Amino acid sequence: MQFDLHRALANLDLRADWIGLRQVTETTTTRYVRDRIPQANGRSHTQGVMVEVLAEGQFGYAATNRLDQDSVNRAAEAAYQQAISAAQWSVHPFTLAERPQAVGQYHSPVQARQMLSAADLNDLLIQVCDTLKVGDAIVKTAAMAQVIETEQRLVSSNGSDIEQSFFLIGTDYEATAQDGSTVQKRTDNGMLARCYQTGMEVFATQAVLDRARRIGEQALELLAAEECPTINTTLVLAPDQMMLQIHESIGHPLELDRILGDERNYAGSSFVKLSDFGQLVYGSPLMNVTFDPTVRGEFASYAFDDAGMAAQREYLIREGILLRGLGSLESQSRAQVAGVANFRSSSWNRAPIDRMANLNLEPGESSFNEIISEIEFGVYMESNRSWSIDDYRNKFQFGCEYARLIENGQLTRTLKNPNYRGITNPFWRGLIKVGDHSTVEMYGTPYCGKGEPNQAIRVGHASPVCAFAGIDVFGGAG
């Protein structure tokens, strides 16, 4: 039976300026097959209510997984006492402006919601493993599918009533090939990159198996490939690697709570300063980055954040100039910097914090063939394999699964173990080509970690193919 949040709110007796109740119910179904043998067939369910209270200019939080009035009352009292205690050490006073009144709904766009049976989905994943094994040198195959159904409702003492439901699917297919001491792994655009708000139509058998065959064939191809050279050159990144590049060198450094110092102890800080907004040349004039939770089917789409702020498309960076941060109403009030609707929590038992959502690089005007044809020598890379970036999100080193040499305007030899390194602003200022709409692809990640206690949240990224000049590329070759 649905818990009556309005009644629970009406029955609270607190001397608070504002009270919010946020209920979250989530069911996760996971199927995993390795080498044709099912390894995991699980379903988990979680539900609870987070109570938020504004008193004496401070917010307090407490949660309960017991959906009855007494439990909500106890959580509300605990949240109230937390806010009162925090007021003694206040560094910034908050008001109702940080919790706007909002009423609305959101539902993930889904064509086929009816869940596949465990038998049918396992059968498909076994077929994926069979298809991945394109030769005897494929020594391991794996296929995973995860379906997440989330219902969320927020009601508040100033009249907010927001209902949002999410239907999320993530898949991961991989093949590992071995020849003696040489081992290469190829995945479906990177680990867990194919995460979307979509329905069971994503499991269309022929399309899935076609991708699996290509993954297996490229794993074998990498065994015989040359080592990536060590050279300063033009680098072309596919959208599946641009996802990681955007996430680490744009998303995290623009989170206002990091810039304010809130995350320094755990997730790190940022090289960006509050004075940089409106001034910093973050990248070349071809660089246009938007925060956009309104994109249909992208992994982190929604209508309202967890403060009740309406989500809309906003430019963070336009023609290379940094304009606004990834900061909620609370962070905007503290920093006096423009932000976005990104106050998000990972579950009912976590307080919202500044998070990425859908962070996208806008397309340019060049086709893939036009980008490649204008490069005399360079390297093209796909699919993230490894990442390392400092606590300020400034210096980084990323590795990819698959690469091709670019010679005289053409993709030529396959390269293995490709890597590149850079520093965020010089790297983005080296952006010389941005692909058009035909090159744009959309991906997601389910495990962006941040916060104490930790919160793993879902993020989406869309990007065209991009070319960068003067990048240090390296691999196993001298």
Image (cartoon, grey):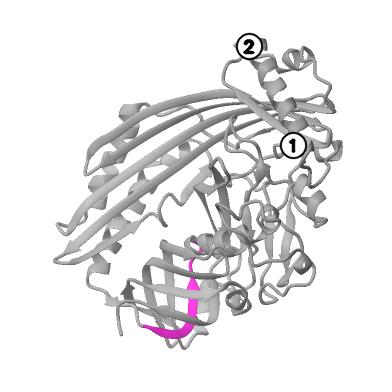
Q: Which SS type dominates the magenta stretch?
A: strand
Crowding at label 2, few (<14), some or many (≥20) Cα neighbours within 10 Å?
A: few
Please state the horizontal and vertical placement of residue 448, each as a whole percent of the image.
52, 49
Is residue 368 or residue 418 the one in the foreground? Answer: 418
Please state the horizontal and vertical placement of residue 148, each as a whole percent of the image.
49, 33
Q: Amino acid at mark 1?
A: Ala
Side of 87 relative to 381 (left or right):
right
Q: Quadrant of the N terminus?
A: top right
Is residue 448 or residue 288 the one in the foreground? Answer: 448
Crowding at label 1, few (<14), some or many (≥20) Cα neighbours within 10 Å?
A: some
Residue at the (43%, 26%) spot, across then down: 44
Is residue 28 or residue 374 the one in the foreground? Answer: 28
Residue 68's label in the rendered image is 2
The answer to which quarter of the image holds residue 247 is bottom right
Residue at the (57%, 55%) spot, across then down: 461
Q: Is residue 314 visible?
A: yes
Vertical comparison of 39 with 464: above or below: above
Please state the horizontal and vertical placement of residue 418, each as a whole percent of the image.
37, 72
Residue 113's label in the rendered image is none
Residue 86's label in the rendered image is 1
Magenta-colored span: 230-239
